[in-house]
Image (cartoon, helix red, strand yellow):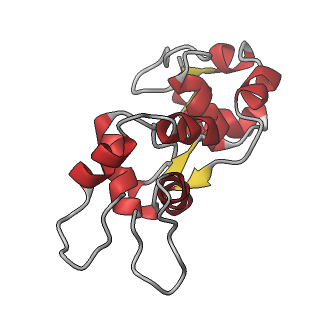
Amino acid sequence: MDTTDRVDAGQAAKRLKVSATAFRWARHTGLLPAPDAPPARWSRAAVEAMDADAIRAAMPVAPIRGSAAADRIAATLGTPNVSGLRAFVTAFVVRRFVDRGLPVDLAANADSGSLHHPGQDDRVCCREDLADLVAADTPSDPNKPQPA
C-alpha cells in the first residue's frame, strides 16, 4: 500500500468533512474502526467506508473547553466560578478528571487545553461523589472556599 493512501485521524476527518473532535469522539465510542494501516492510520478504503453523517450525529454540538467544564462543575456544586475571582473549580481539576478517565479529552494537542463532549460533562456533574472528586483533585489552598 502506498503511504499516500494512508491517512491519520485529522486527514480522515477532513476527507469526510467532519470536525476533528467529532471524528475523535466517534473513534472513542467505537463508532469507527481502529486504524487498519501502520502507523495508526486508515487506508483509503477504510475512510471511504466510514459514515460521515453518523459521525456528525454522534457529536451534534460543539465540544466544550476544559475551563467551561470547570465552570459547569462549580455551578453544579453551588459555588460558581466568578470572573475576576479565584475559581473554585479549575481546568486543572478537569484535566485530573480526564486522567481518571471520567471525560475523554478530544483535543488533538494537550498543550492547547482540553475539549470535551458536553454529554460527558453532564454525566460527570450528575455524580454523587462530585464534591469529593473535586476536593481530591484540587491543590490545597487554605484561602479557597470549600464545598458545602
Report the front residue among 78 and 60.
78
Q: Is residue 146 left or right of residue 142?
A: right
Q: Quadrant of the C terminus?
A: bottom left
The answer to whether 114 is drawn above or below residue 7 in the figure is below
Residue name at image x 53 percent, y 50 percent: 115
Q: Is residue 140 left or right of residue 5?
A: left
Q: Quadrant of residue 100?
A: top left
Horizontal and vertical percent position of residue 137: 25, 52
Report the front residue among 132 and 110.
132
Q: Quadrant of residue 56?
A: top right
Residue at the front extreme?
A: 148
Horizontal and vertical percent position of residue 26: 61, 25
Residue name at image x 77 percent, y 36 percent: 60
Horizontal and vertical percent position of residue 45: 67, 13
The answer to whether 49 is drawn above or below residue 78 in the figure is above
Residue at the right extreme?
A: 53
Q: Quadrant of residue 113?
A: bottom left
Report the front residue among 107 and 86.
86
Residue name at image x 18 percent, y 75 percent: 142
